[in-house]
Amino acid sequence: MLSRPGDFAALQELGKVRSDPLVVVRFRGTGLEATRLGLATGKTLGTAVVRNRVRRRLREVFRALTPEIGPGWDILVIARPAIVGADARTIAGTIRRLLHRGGVVKGNEA
């Protein structure tokens, strides 16, 4: 899990960006043995209950995508307000598509 401000700053400066109405995904290769995930859910999403629900859903998407993502990536997902009303399948498909376009996930885009 990404937690240090320096890691987020490195993604901001050196990372690639792909976006969609539901999320913005920033990522960069690190060469580390693990892939680290960061989640940003701002107050524009709603109350703490809503933000926590969105974070849980995003973590579940990444659990499912872990076998397709190789080691050595830092990934930051910034949730946009439209994600609150989206279903799990739409969220998963969107994130997978954005990561595929960025070269993080290999294989079919579907």
Image (tube, grey):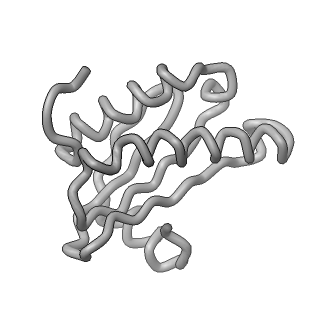
Q: Number of numbered discs present?
A: 0
Q: Nearer the viewer, residue 39 or 16?
A: 39
Is residue 20 rendered to the left or right of residue 96? right
Residue at 48%, 20% (x, y): give it: 90
Q: Nearer the viewer, residue 102 or 107?
A: 107
Is residue 77 rendered to the left or right of residue 29? right
Q: Nearer the viewer, residue 34 or 82?
A: 34
From what the image shows, is residue 48 above or below residue 5? above
x, y percentage for residue 21? 50, 25
Is residue 65 rendered to the left or right of residue 44? left
Residue at 38%, 71% (x, y): give it: 10
Quarter holding residue 19: top left
From what the image shows, is residue 96 above or below residue 17? above
x, y percentage for residue 8? 47, 68
x, y percentage for residue 9? 45, 71
Residue at 77%, 45% (x, y): give it: 43
Is residue 10 rendered to the left or right of residue 54? left
x, y percentage for residue 69? 26, 50
Quarter holding residue 64: top left
Residue at 45%, 59% (x, y): give it: 37
Quadrant the C terminus occupies? top left
